[in-house]
Image (cartoon, grey):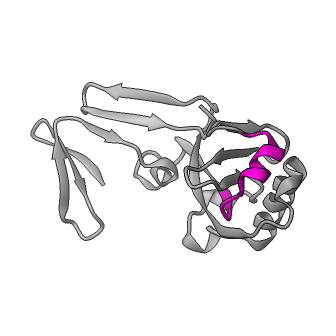
Amino acid sequence: EFRRVLFRSEARGENGLVFATARNVVVATEAYKSRLRGHRRDVVPLYSYVVATDPLPASVWAEIGWGDRETFADGRNMVTYAQRTGDGRIVFGGRGAPYRFAGDIHSSHDTSRSVHDGIVETLHELFPATVGVRISHRWGGPLAVPRDWHPSVLRDPRRSEEHTSELQSPC
């Protein structure tokens, strides 16, 4: 809960304890912003899922042709994005998760065997050299998509709060 108290903004946890006070507050709550009173329709909470490979040997990186730590995105029906990590893995994610009615956010939605399997299939389609490489990690969670699909930072001088609406993108 965020509220004004004598020219300061105050953030309180569910138990009522104040865990931050400041003149200016950046509200960067991603999908959870939709749970704040008065902000339910500011963003659409959508789920994104990610997998990571085991570290790849230099020969696989050479076959793929991915020399540095560039990121990329693919805007097909299942939006995908990937990055080479410092320890030599590919972290590869995608949006193939179904929309949850009324933007339901719950930890039980953070993984999906079928969606993760689809992401791995797309990974292998784009990078055939990864076929046979073990997938060491699978995870997911909600992210915020602004209703106009444009990332933004807004400042409300009356409330001394900055609000961010982030759209996951390969910047």
Q: Nearer the viewer, residue 26 or 170?
A: 170
Image quadrant of residue 13? bottom left
Residue at figure coordinates x 82%, y 58% from the top left: 130
Locate the C terminus and report the quarter of the image it occupies.
top right
Q: Residue furthest left?
A: 6
Q: Nearer the viewer, residue 57 or 153?
A: 57
Image quadrant of residue 16? bottom left
In screen coordinates, is 135 left or right of 160? right
Residue at figure coordinates x 34%, y 33% from the top left: 162
Residue at figure coordinates x 30%, y 55% from the top left: 1
Residue 148 x, y percent position in the rendering: 63, 31
Residue 67 x, y percent position in the rendering: 69, 38
Total residue callouts: 0
The magenta region covers: 48-66
Residue 101 x, y percent position in the rendering: 68, 61
Q: Nearer the viewer, residue 73 or 16?
A: 73
Residue at figure coordinates x 86%, y 62% from the top left: 131
Residue 40 magenta-highlighted? no
Residue 117 x, y percent position in the rendering: 81, 67
The correct choice, above or below, for 69 with respect to 103 in the image is: above
The correct choice, above or below, for 150 with respect to 22 in the image is: above
In screen coordinates, is 114 left or right of 53? right
The correct choice, above or below, for 94 with respect to 163 in the image is: below
Q: Nearer the viewer, residue 68 or 111?
A: 68
In screen coordinates, is 139 left or right of 118? left
